[in-house]
Image (tube, rainbow, N blue to C red):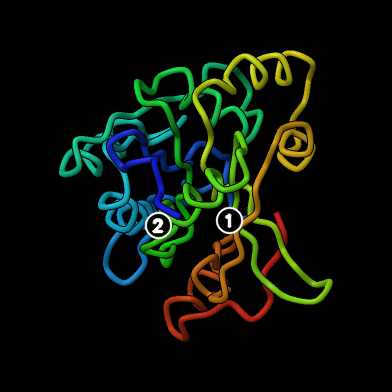
Amino acid sequence: MAVSIAPQQITGLILAGGRGSRMGHVDKGLQAFRGKPLAAHALERLSPQVHCLAINANRHENDYAALGAEFHALVWPDLLSDFPGPLAGLHSGLTHCSTDYLAAVPCDSPLLPADLVARLAERMEQNNADAALAVTGHYGQQQRHPVFCLLKKTLLPLLTQFLQDDGRKMERWFAGIRTAEVHFDDETAFSNVNTLQELHALESTGKIEKLESE
């Protein structure tokens, strides 16, 4: 089946707006991994998959602007106060983006798949869904990765209302909309860094032995 969603219709968003509480409140996206900030790896991997890029950041906006300059990436902070979580980043992305679709990835997953967006778009089309997200694992031990997602721009009013009603949990948000799941075999590609120990482990071994669920 041919995919009708073209990269030119998609804005890519790096989610870097969190507090980094489990990493001692440092800005995760700016931590070094193999000689470059974590967010730089995400930008490099996502850039070929989308039409344009942006970074959702609430701290060190100038640093992120400099990091994204090579990719002409804009910095879009949350439009809601008090760091309400990744859904606020998606809300900012959907509000600002001028394309029909928004593809989001976290800043702390430097090994994300090169075919992530294409596969999410294909399954979204096949299932006539409004969103698609990545899944790994097998046989009752599957793990959903809602921060790796593709969303229709038309979801903005629903997400705005959800947040206004104090909704914060990504799983609850996705449960209320038509969402397609896309299975990926390589779990390492979705390794995300929550602590400095995990960052060092991923850098030295290429994997995180015990990954805390988000």
- Residue 141 lies, with reference to residue 144, above or below; the image says below
Where is residue 165? Give x, y as percent: 79, 15
- Residue 50 lies, with reference to residue 156, above or below; the image says below
Q: What element carries label 1?
A: helix
Q: Which residue lies furthest to the left in this view?
A: 70
**Residue placed most toward the observer, 150 or 83:** 150
Where is residue 57? Give x, y as percent: 43, 33
Q: Residue furthest bottom?
A: 205
Amino acid on which disc 1 is placed: Met
Residue that carries the numbered disc 2 in the rendered image: 31
Q: How crowded is mark 1: few (under 14 residues within 10 Å), some or many (20 or more)?
A: some
Amino acid on which disc 2 is placed: Gln
Q: Residue furthest front?
A: 1
Dots 1 and 2: beta carbons under 8 Å?
Answer: yes
The residue sitting at 51% across, 42% down in the picture is 150
Image quarter of the N terminus: bottom left
Q: In which quarter of the image is residue 163?
A: top right
Between the residue at mark 1 and the residue at mark 2, the CA separation in whole angstroms equals: 10 Å
Image quarter of the C terminus: bottom right
Judge left or right: residue 79 versus residue 118: right
Residue that carries the numbered disc 1 in the rendered image: 23
The residue sitting at 33% across, 41% down in the picture is 6
The residue sitting at 36% across, 67% down in the picture is 33
Quick one: label 1 or label 2, which is nearer the N terminus? Answer: 1
Judge left or right: residue 166 versus residue 189: right
